Amino acid sequence: MFTLASGLSAFAGEVKRRDIEPGIKALGKDGRTLGLEVQLRGSTTSSAVLAGYLLKAEESKSYENRATSFVPFERLSPEAQRVVLMKIFENDVVDDDGWHHTAIFSGETLWTLCKWTTDNGANYKLVQGMPENKVSGTLKKGDRVRIPFKLLSDVMKQHTVKQLPKVLAKNILEAKPVAEPMLKIEVVANKRIVAKPTVSQKLPAKQIITVAEKVSSSPDLTFKRDGQGEYAGYTIKKGETLYSSVVMRFTDYSDHADVVKAAKEVARRTAIKDMRDIDAGLKVRIPIDMLSAKYQPQGTKARVAYDKSVKKSTRLKKAVVEKKKDLSDIVVILDPGHGGEDHGAHYSRSGLYEDEINYDIVMRIKDLLQKETGAKVYMTLKDKSSGYAFNDRTRFTHDKDEMLLTNPYHGNDDAKRSGNLRCMLVNKIYDAERKRGVPARKIIFTSLHTESVMNKSHRGTKVFIPGYQYRRSSFNFGSSYAEYEEGRNFNSYKSSSSERKTDEALSRNFAVIFMDELGKHRIKRNDGGHAIRGEIRKSRSTVYVPAVLNYTKVPTKILIETANLQNATDRQRLADPWWRQEYAKAYVAALKRYYKAPTAKASVAKAAK
């Protein structure tokens, strides 16, 4: 054990600290020392709380009444070790390819990194031998390294698609009875899983249902029933709130006011009197119909539709388009959200306005596409003063001179009117390219936005796709747009059920690739819930798809929410021109992967042969 005198005072090198909870911080020194900085004396944190971080819980008592202590990495539980790693190395990403590490200290070593992530420092030889890891045994700041997925220890593999089924199965089969009626899981000989009442509880026959109807894609949810019907149970952890840890994670509510109303509904169902005073361990009840389709029990209409869409996405992965040299036959329609009088979300103290950020990132995407590919690029918007140029500003002003490229131009004086005109403009472009002979699947549409979620811990990118369950089969924008060519000739929309299902599947495939590329470029993806969503919920009965995804004909289409302006770290990223350029690079890389065009790395490798 290290006390302040014996351990932390010796940390004269480069030290980084990150808050985990009151009295407990993640601490890293020079990339070779990791652990917890603990202050229990005079803190609300108790040794019982610290015990949850330790490999040997009984050691927690020895840290009481110490001003400050240091708990070395090796004395932490595997789960706590992962928390420390992710807190200190906040740009690291884990996906199905492995652990992507960015060095933030000078002097980090591959041996230590492999010891932490694979439990065996000797694995550094395998990692160093990988062609993409062009590093020595000692890393420099900014060096990037990938540790293959198969080498990672079990806990370091968590939160990846490959691991979810195992985690889910373990959670179900090890579920323990609780005071209220709960369904017990059994696996029978024919491999059909059924649910029966626990020994101590008897339920009416109508409550005995198959697990196929009661499994969520989240191992943190259990499905139960009370006098008001079925609900999803979730156990609140220390520091969690109904706003972010329940509503924003498991539902499709997005607007701040809607999230607050939903949180109040969960509080009412759970008999919570004060949402500001919730103890860890409380089991909250979320009405089933509030859940996102992904988290609903199997067997519900929404979950069945979601699963079918995912399966269709898998089938369509093999049939996108044939390989092409440089995207020369692909049409890309880019839509920077808001503009003109409508600045969208903003954080004026930092000089950050959504429309200006959206435009800058889209201009970078446009520039890369035109320099690196032969893709045909359309814009829905143009800034009259700056044209199609991006800039390296860290602060912006709201200049109000962005014009929608309709005929004649529209000044964006009304958000709803502008949104409808964008749909008509996109459909005009789509129809023109289809008449030119471009296949529907070789046209792609992207609307780029920046969100403002009042919960300041909410971070990272979310992507919306056109969830077919909530789209209209037809829509007419009315006669009030007749002054525009688009309003006269493209003011109605119509699609079949089959087309809408295909739209969702194709869009999901692109969204998955895009999110993966963001990770490779060290860009935060939202982990407060499902990062790829098919709809937005306003109430338990009102669910919708954004207009530019709902009423446009392009099959492959996404709406991106890049980051949260209410989060300090996200604001730093948005203000950084380098980050905005990396964001654009990630999008272009995703486009190349989706259409199976060779990447720059692949082209160089081929030329070298």
Image: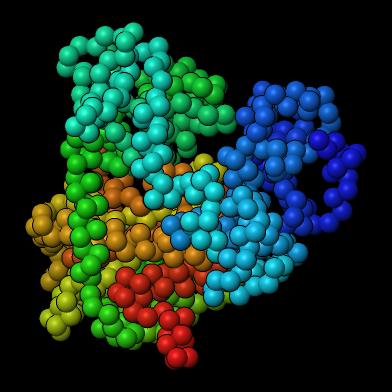
Q: Position of residue 281 (x, y in %)?
A: 51, 22
Residue 289, image quadrant: top left
At 46% across and 44% down in the image, what residue appears? 528
Q: Report whether 492 appears left or right of 358.
A: left
Rendered position, 568 above or below 368: above
Q: Position of residue 476 (x, y in %)?
A: 13, 58
Q: Position of residue 55 (x, y in %)?
A: 65, 33
- Residue nearest the viewer, comparing 564 with 38: 38
Q: Is residue 100 visible?
A: no
In the rendered view of the protein, which quadrant contains the C terminus?
bottom left
Q: How is the image coloured?
A: rainbow
In the rendered view of the protein, which quadrant contains the N terminus?
top right
- Residue nearest the viewer, comparing 386 with 275: 275
Q: Report whether 93 appears left or right of 214.
A: right
Rendered position, 547 above or below 379: above
Residue 113, image quadrant: bottom right
